[in-house]
Image (cartoon, helix red, strand yellow):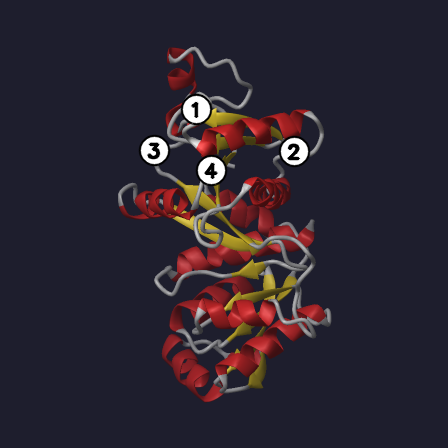
């Protein structure tokens, strides 16, 4: 895929999904959900303060008769209900509305109605960079602060699942470090090599892992050739595994604010996709994320 428009078009070829929106009283969220509904990729159940939602919908010209509405004004209860709709198979994915991330994640992890399945939760972001020739998958820029080797393995597996939903059959995963050579004083480079070996040994499946790789030689064939790097991932990475949340978050925001890139994002590792966008994200970014959720839910 060259851009996020391709991702949305692919979502339009899938069966329509049902999205449960937690704390739906938010302008950008409602706009994104309405646009997704009009594209025919989702129907939605809106859970939250319906009085406030109606005010916003009236201002936006959205007909709420097209939606199932559940009036729950308490944020915690609204999140629990939204998640329960998914765990009881009445919806295919859940989306965060006007509520703190910690509240909806607590509902996702609830032992009685939540979506836990024993995997690590990780944010998988899709980057559409105007100067680059294809989409890049980035993980994890938002959830895991300083993942250890086992966590990185699971972050890769979550990202590979997303890549496959985007019709990337054998995604190439670059373990990003400050240098492309193993240095015992830089633990991330040691773990990157271990992850590459784990993939070769069959402990990480359905992808090709390479590392350590610096950002330039992970995404640029010319940079890889210049440094004489002979690795099947070098210059051809589909997925960038970041060493920690600091590197991932800075790269993500650099793409958005410096490169004026578009994004989509989803939390993986639960029983169903979680559309967990930032309050600062535009309605377009939220629509892209819904489309990504449709692809993951369709696999």
Residue 2 location (% of width, % of height) = 47, 36
Q: Which residue is found at the position 48% from the left and 21% from the top?
A: 234
Return the disc, 3 or 4, that comes first in the chain's sequence: 3
Return the disc, 1 or 2, that comes first in the chain's sequence: 2
Alpha carbon distance from label 1 to label 2: 32 Å
Reading the image, the residue beneath label 2 is 169
Mark linked to residue 183 = 1
Q: Which residue is found at the position 62% from the left and 54% from the top?
A: 269
Alpha carbon distance from label 3 to label 2: 24 Å
Alpha carbon distance from label 1 to label 4: 27 Å
Return the disc, 2 or 4, that comes first in the chain's sequence: 4
Can residue 176 be seen in this snapshot?
A: no
Alpha carbon distance from label 3 to label 4: 12 Å
Reading the image, the residue beneath label 4 is 136
Number of other residues with Cα within 10 Å of mark 3, as a class: few under 14, some 14 to 19, many 20 or more: few
| Foreground label between 3 and 4 | 4
Return the disc, 1 or 4, that comes first in the chain's sequence: 4
Residue 254 location (% of width, % of height) = 31, 44
């Amino acid at each position: 895929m060259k851009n996020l428009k391709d991702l949305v078009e692919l979502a339009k070829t899938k069966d329509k999904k049902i999205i449960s929106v937690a704390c739906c009283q938010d302008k950008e969220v409602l706009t994104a959900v309405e646009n997704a509904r009009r594209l025919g990729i989702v129907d939605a159940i809106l859970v939250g303060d319906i009085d406030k939602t109606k005010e916003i919908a009236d201002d936006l010209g959205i007909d709420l008769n097209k939606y199932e509405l559940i009036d729950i004004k308490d944020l915690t209860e609204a999140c629990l209900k939204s998640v329960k709709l998914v765990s009881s198979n009445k919806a295919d994915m859940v989306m965060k509305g006007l509520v703190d991330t910690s509240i909806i994640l607590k509902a996702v992890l609830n032992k009685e109605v939540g979506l836990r399945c024993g995997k690590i939760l990780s944010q998988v972001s899709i980057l559409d960079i105007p100067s680059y020739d294809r989409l890049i998958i980035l993980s994890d820029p938002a959830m895991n602060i300083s993942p250890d080797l086992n966590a990185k393995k699971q972050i890769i597996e979550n990202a590979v699942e997303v890549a496959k939903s985007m019709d990337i059959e054998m995604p190439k995963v670059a373990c990003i470090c400050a240098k492309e050579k193993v240095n015992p004083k830089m633990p991330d480079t040691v773990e990157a090599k271990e992850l590459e070996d784990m993939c070769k040994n069959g402990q990480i499946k359905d992808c090709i892992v390479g590392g350590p790789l610096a950002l330039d030689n992970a995404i640029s064939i010319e940079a890889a050739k210049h440094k004489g790097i002979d690795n099947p991932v070098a210059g051809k990475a589909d997925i960038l595994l970041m060493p920690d949340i600091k590197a991932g978050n800075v790269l993500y925001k650099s793409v958005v604010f410096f490169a004026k890139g578009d994004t989509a994002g989803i939390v993986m590792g639960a029983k169903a996709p979680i559309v967990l966008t930032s309050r600062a994200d535009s309605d377009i970014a939220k629509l892209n994320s819904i489309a990504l959720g449709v692809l993951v839910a369709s696999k």
